[in-house]
Amino acid sequence: MNLTFATAGRVLSQLRGDHRTVALIIVLPCLLIGLIAWMFDDQPQVLDRFGPMLVGIFPLIVMFLVTSVATLRERQSGTLERLMTTPIRKGDFVAGYGLAFATLALVQALVVVGFATWVGMDVDGPLWLVLVVAMLDAVLGCTLGLAASALARSEFQAVQMMPAILFPQLITCGLLMPRDQMPEVLEWLSRVFPLTYAVEAMTSLAAGDEWADIRGAVGVIALFIVGAMLLGVLTLRRRTA
Amino acid sequence: MVIRGLRVVRGGRPIIDGLDLRVPAGSVVGLMGPSGSGKTTLMRSLVGVQDKVTGTVEVLGGAAGSPVLRRRVGYMTQDASVYTDLTVVQNLRYFAALAGIPDGAEAVAAAVGTVDLGGHEKQRVGTLSGGERSRVSLAAALVGGPDLLVLDEPTVGLDPVLRRDLWAVFRRLAAEGRTLLVSSHVMDEATQCDRLILMRDGALVADTTPDELLATTGAPDAERAFLALIDAARPAARPAQGTGPSGSTGPSESTGPSGSTGPSESTESTEETAR
């Protein structure tokens, strides 16, 4: 457990030193939400409906990319090999990354939700739940990124993992078309993707639902996090060729 | 360190094929050999990160790479594997924490002193010179106070002054009772070791001491002694050579210097691989 915290602290120190990445992670979603607010200035219901979804999707995408590249960097620089000769357990490594990025995600969610509210986003449900779901999404993105990085042998491949793993989810999650209007097969497919539940939770919060209404979706996201973490641990090899 | 019948396969091809080796604790052991001779693979097997390893590899009385051992072994990879976006102290504090030292301030300060990086503590590793970076990497390996240090070419690319200083550090660490396995292909460094292990094509060419090496080959310096041994072992790999493979296995030369531990077996295994 201590080594999980040591690893999380180390990853956070790395992030603290990288002002540009932190700025991108926090400012970029605000900028995009600002664009939407501006574009639909005379139709505030658009921001009310899509704002929370975007607040849930941004952290997933960003954390996925950042973690998969960070892990690949650890593999290529030899630091991962060195870590594997120390008492650290593979779970410490995965959980350490998850914890560090969850912390960053909390900051991101606070700033982004604050900004979105400021530019006119109205959430009928409790705002703190929007924060919680956004953070869970970030952790999910992080753990998915860790698992995906095991499949990538180069930076090129690592970056391609994002469209490969996230785009199908984006298309079927209900953002482009309500899920009940999709062809049946696609609707079924959307149910096995974690992003669907993130968007579902956010949509229902936007419509004024409470904890009791979204806890099922939140539970599924949590299960996916656990699953992705296990996958991340399993794909991490102590012994390599 | 006890190695029996070590065999490592990489990319479908055996890199090390039937290696036997015994190394006593508390000494500086030089692992010498041309590049591609299997030095790094052997080291990776010893620290437990090498895949497809068969045979017995025991370190400090335990199986290589076992959880208990990982606390007692420090490994320095060939390239400086530290976090370039962290400062020297941030790096060392993390590796101290991994080794189970909760408040690492003292250990970190000691490690910084050992590798003579005082004054650079707050500097980011990415802004350090190559030599300084590899010393941070060395410090990261020894900050946990390991009993065995496995150092893969720690002095490569360093200037002579730094090399001399580092070898002084190695001697000091050994005097504290630690065992150091140091790989190199700079043969001058061989003379600073207590024992020498010479490898070629994944097999043991000799397990000897610097004095013995010079005495048995009759060469004026370590470099030429090494070349003599390597050349003596070579015809096994190149049977087409005119001098004839039978004489070239050169028992007088190749078996002679190594004396104690099974060099004859290793020469045989080289032949097997060649065929």
Image (tube, helix red, strand yellow):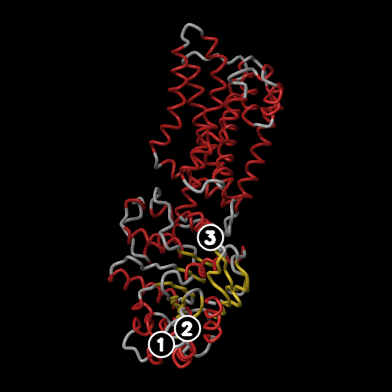
> In the image as oriented, which residue stretches furthest toward the top?
A42
Whether residue A189 is situated above or below residue B257 in the rendered picture: above
User: Is A48 situated above or below B23?
Assistant: above
Point 55% across, 17% down: residue: A50
What amino acid does circle 1 point to? Answer: Leu
Image location of residue B255, percent across then percent down: 49, 89
Q: Chain of mark 1?
A: B
The answer for how far apart the CA atoms under marks 1 and 3 are is 37 Å
Quadrant of image for the N terminus of chain B? bottom right
Q: Residue at x 49, y 19 (%)?
A: A116
Instruction: Choose the circle earlier in sequence order: 2 or 3.
Output: 3
Tag 2's secondary structure? strand
Residue shown at 36% from the left, 68% from the top = B155
Instruction: For the C terminus of chain B, give its image quadrant.
Output: bottom right
Q: Nearer the viewer, residue B230 or B71?
A: B230
Number of the label disc, if any, that sits on residue B213:
1
